[in-house]
Amino acid sequence: MAETKEKSLSDKKPKPRVRPIVRLGIFLISHSFHVSVVCCTAGVLALFLLPVLAKNTYISENALMPGSASPMLSNQHVSDGNRLVKDLTNPNSKSSETGIESHKIIAQYMLDLGAEVSFHKFHPQMNQFHPLHFFSSPDSGKIQENYSCSSYGINTVGIIRAPRGDGKEAIVLVTPYNALKSGFGEALSLGIAYSVFSLLTQVTWLAKDIIWLVADSQYGEYAAVAAWLREYQTPKFSSLSTPNAEMCPDVNNLFELKGHSISGSKFSNSFRRAGTMAAALVLKVRDQNEQFEDTISIYAEASNGQMPNLDLINVVNYLAVHRQGLRVNVEKLWSLLNSSWLKSLGEIFESLAKVAKSLYPKWKFGIPATEYVEGTATLASSLYYQALGVPTGPHGAFRDYQVDAITLEISPKFSLDKVWRNDILLRGGRLIEGVIRSVNNLLEKFHQSFFLYLLTSPSKFVSVGVYMIAFALLIAPLPMVAASLYVDANSSSNCSKGDSSTPSAITDTDEHSIAIRSWRWLNSAKLVFIVHLWGAIVSLLPYFISQIPDCSPTTSFMIWVLLSILSLLTLNSVLASPLACAKATQEKEWALVKSVTISSVFIGLGLMSVINFATAEIGALLMVPMCLLAQPLKLDVRAGTLRSFCRMICNLVLGHIAFPPAAFFLLKGMLDGFGNANVGDFWMWVESLWAWNSATYLFIGMVQLPCWVLCISILFHTC
Amino acid sequence: RPKQEEFSEELLLKPFPDHKLLAHFHFQSSAPPSTSNGCHHHLFPKAISQLVQKFRIKEMELSFTQGRWNYESWGGFDPISSSNAKPPGVELWAVFDVPQHHIDASWKNLTHTLSGLFCAPINFLESTATYSTPEWSFPPASGNVRYGTLPCEAVCTENLTPWLKLLPCRDKAGIALLLDGPLLYRGFYHSQRLHLTSTGSSSEGIDSGIILEQTLTVVLQPNSEMAIEVHASEKHIQPSWSLSSIFGKQVSGICVLAKSSSVYLLLDRGLLAELKFPNKENGKSAANGLTSENFWSNPSFELSANPDRIFLEESSSHSKSLSILYMFQVEKYSESEPFDIGLMWKVPVAWLCQQTPLHASRFLMGSGNERAAIAISLKSTQFTEGFMSANSKDGSCELRVAVFQVVPWYVKVYFHSLRVFVDQQPRAVSDIIEKIHVSPSKDKMSPGVMEVVLKLPCRVNTAALTIEFDKGFLRIDEHTSDANQGFDIPSAIISFPNFHASMVFLKDDSLNKSPEKCPVMSYTEVLLVPLTTPDFSMPYNVITITCTVFALYFGSLLNVLQRRVAEEERFLKAKAAKKTGRLPLLLSKLSAKLRGRRLEPLHSPPSSSSFINSKLVLKVILVAGLAVGWQYFSS
């Protein structure tokens, strides 16, 4: 061991003083086992403490001034909105096959308000796997020839120009609407948006233009919004790529009818724009609801765990709770709410806080156990959706263009009577009006508040400065253990030789062999590199597999697994085998491999924490114990003590859990029950990950999977 | 005998198709080129004449604008809109009559003078990075012209007051009585303009006449009953209005210093074509019988006052319909019988204003903080088709479009990336561009200027011009106080050299005193480019980090300088030999532990120490436990 060597050396002659920082490093490395146990426990504990440490949100940007003006939305506007809802739900309007009638109705309503109206027709663009398009800015769309007349969507866009504004900025209001099979909820959301829109045409305080986008959601809400944004931000001027949809009779019909409307100049079939988008709100109304009060759900997660500025959520939360009396909730993992262990953990924290408070009254960090459980459930879902990297709604499309956006889903307590409908129109409308008015007050873009945070409730958040501590504690042991293993592996071979002779007899001739030994880690590094290369190949394979036509998810998954194994064997035989054989005789080979693996995992986790914190955190929870515990099973079997037996069990369990598909099925089983798990599900999940350009996919393919393979290889190492 | 100084005031009202009303105030003062009066003036504002004399200004225009001119519904082809539609904020251009190398100095002094005169930060235009020198594409003037804009300047009454002070009667009498600040700024568009022209022999400098035109253009929504009966069947009927209902006042007499004082009502070609005058068939007689009753007692509208004169537009070659101008002389009215004019609509009418041949809009493309592109898209309006057919005698008819674009230096435009699309087809730049002049920007020195004349086929439907740029990094002190808002790219000017907006009326009058053709030009939108902003709390961080680095550096340096290795070793040996006290012993043990000489784990250092040490720890723990217990049970 390192200590024994040092001791033997220092006993002989007075040791020169070592710098304190170096001494501390040596101390930490030599006690790496204890340090890693303490750090990992502290890291997990800190993660569970996050709901307790969450702070109350506050509106950071003074210019927002939410709720400082009394709402101007009156019953007049509500009845306007009601009129639109009636017209849209009228069976006559649904007679048309393509739902163009309802678009015409909406456009006519907008025109009557004096807004500029245009239709934007788009072809839904299938998300495809572009191996090199991760992190790249959204492109202006792929050229696809096989557009047909039948598959296009129509977004209706209305723009109010701020009478005295300079038109440099705009606020976007999006209501997804499927003309073909619209529920009452969608019509109601249009009604709310229309009542706000009709108010905004009359107000004098408007400084930013208002864009109302009725997104045709028959090909998905996200696709419609993304298509409109693509046209808005990166239009194509050349017609070579645009399909000749003008040939399609329906669309022409639509445009012609509008053409000779009376306020003709306000309508145009060209794409209309306003200025730079300041913020966007997506408004939805849920059809069915079993809740007892009107609630509003906020969805904020965009691709790769990006969040809108916290101020936007704060404004909505403040106005909804304190002005409109709506209950606000954010997404929770419902299965966690009933878990008893979480409840007891919360009770422990609560009683601890009670004791602390009685000791010193100013220590007020405790929260009630129920609140703790709810906070943890919210935090877990916040982590989960950020880690997934898939946007939770159409607002995700805006974030790709650095526009702050959230989705608001109003779920009213359901009843059919008219008073209720007016009430929800009035309150929803006033909420939207208030948010728009606040954003309208902004002089600068959102920048004051947080962009990196996790929500534990609509009014509580954990900022980056706090949650990074948990992660840092979790990954802190990695470099120490790596260094300790490296030192260990190097010195143990030294000792084995040095024991026979006196240490002073180490001569110059040995220095050469020491030099060679100290480079031994390169072999392990090579192995690790090969496995990571394999990881990159595995993450590219789905692109080719997805080209195979008519492949069910299950078969695709099987092909993927087979190809992965095949490529691993090939790589191993081609690149690794000759040297591996030569070095196999060396003892402690596995320690070096483990050391390099741990280093690479540390680097991978560190990089990922910058790109998407939540993925890194969840990955660290899985991988750090596995990496730290990995030791050849043979050694443990040979040792035969209780400790080594425990370690063996842990290793085997972790080896199963940390395998990405296994982790996926476990998580899915925990959330939805194990009954309907299917092998193809994993393929579907992976497909969705790459379709959304999620960095999690890269992380799994290039960090977690190689790490797992290396750990397994250490477990089955023949020492 | 030299001419007298003169002042005249006019107000022109014009209904717009989108239920709004244009009120265009026009005040003109002129000083004759004479030295007889010395430096004294009767009517002409002295500040302006001094300005002209000092800086040798040939021509100058300063405009303060709020809101956007809606080219689609308010038109852009008539003289009023093409000379009074201005970009938001402040725009200033001036032509100097001084040697080339003095121009910049004159410009700087001029901006300072004007900023004092108009209570606006026009002096920001002083730095060379903000103004530019258009070569030939700036239509109103050519030659020694300097052009600068402040797009983000907010306009308010404190800019209006000094402007009103230049009028001989201020806003106390005459038409200017209607100018009420709060009311004007409630409008949809508001532009106050000051135009200076010096005439006569300019070489002597002092001996030149000056014409000062002050115009104020407002677009107002006639305060009608529209809001109440918005759902009535007659919602398309134009709102009826009168001067008193719009401005809340009536004109109760003229400014006695004014030579003439008149109010005009203009109904433009599109509207007249829709109205179908009863005697439209015999247009000749209409032109002759100017006093004919049937022009103002029309089935579709009614005027509340009898016009004093009616002018018909002189028929030009290409337009079939004509505009009509009603004139009311305010001189006839008095305090007891104030002047008021109203227009009452009886039937709904819808028409289109005369549009520019191409409607221009400009927008930003791309996302992110690194690169973006400016796109100017031109779309043909209905007007073009009719006009082109008249103009295309020979087969190859061409439409010339001049684009004048100034970009600030931090928007680093790549001029090679200029791309032109005509009717959605990419075209070679050399085919389309007739003439181009580019002056690249210099960092912190001068803005980039691009002047292009496009040569488009007449039948063009859409055309687009894109150019890419890099977003520059600004130093922390170059950011404005609201840096996170983004930075403005001033409006581009799109002009049509082939066309001239003119409106010539049969009986020449003061409104058309200058029947020279004014160029057709339109301004595009102002763009907002978000640039990367530094962390403005950065100085604090920098100070902290720098101090830490310094502390570490000097600390270790001193440490190294002080240290004597040999003595230290001797000291250590001596210390080992000597029996040490309790605390040093403890410390040395701890340090030995830190060095890792022993194999005891970290978590039990006190227990492994000497007996006295463990006793001490026990004592401490006991006391602490007592304290905790007491605290717990007492509360």
Image (tube, coloured by chain):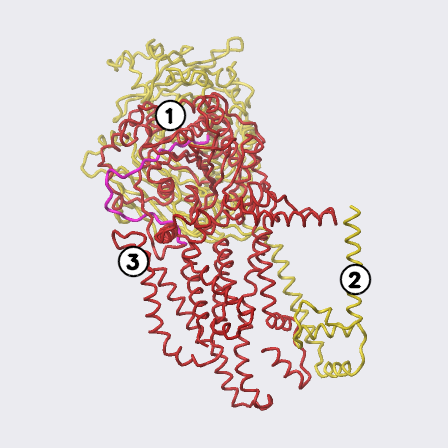
Chain colours: A red, B yellow
For disc 2, the marked residue is B620
For disc 1, the marked residue is A109
The crowding category of the residue bearing disc 2, from other C-alpha atoms within 10 Å (few below 14, some 14 to 19, many at least 20), is few
Viewer-proximal residue among A272 and A674: A674
* Magenta-span inclusion, residue B416: no
Q: Nearer the viewer, mark 2 or mark 3?
A: 2
Name above or below for residue A178 compared with residue B3.
below
Residue B389, can we see it?
Answer: yes
Which is more N-terminal, label 1 or label 3?
A: 1
Q: Nearer the viewer, mark 2 or mark 1?
A: 2
Q: Are labels 3 and 1 assigned to the same chain?
A: yes
For disc 3, the marked residue is A544
Q: Position of residue A332 (x, y in %)?
A: 50, 43
Name above or below for residue B382 compared with residue B245.
below
Residue B110, can we see it?
Answer: no
Confirm or deny contact between disc 3 and disc 1 (CB under 8 A).
no
Q: In the image, which residues are magenta? A: A135-162
| Chain for disc number 3 | A
Q: Nearer the viewer, mark 3 or mark 1?
A: 3
Q: Amino acid at mark 2?
A: Val
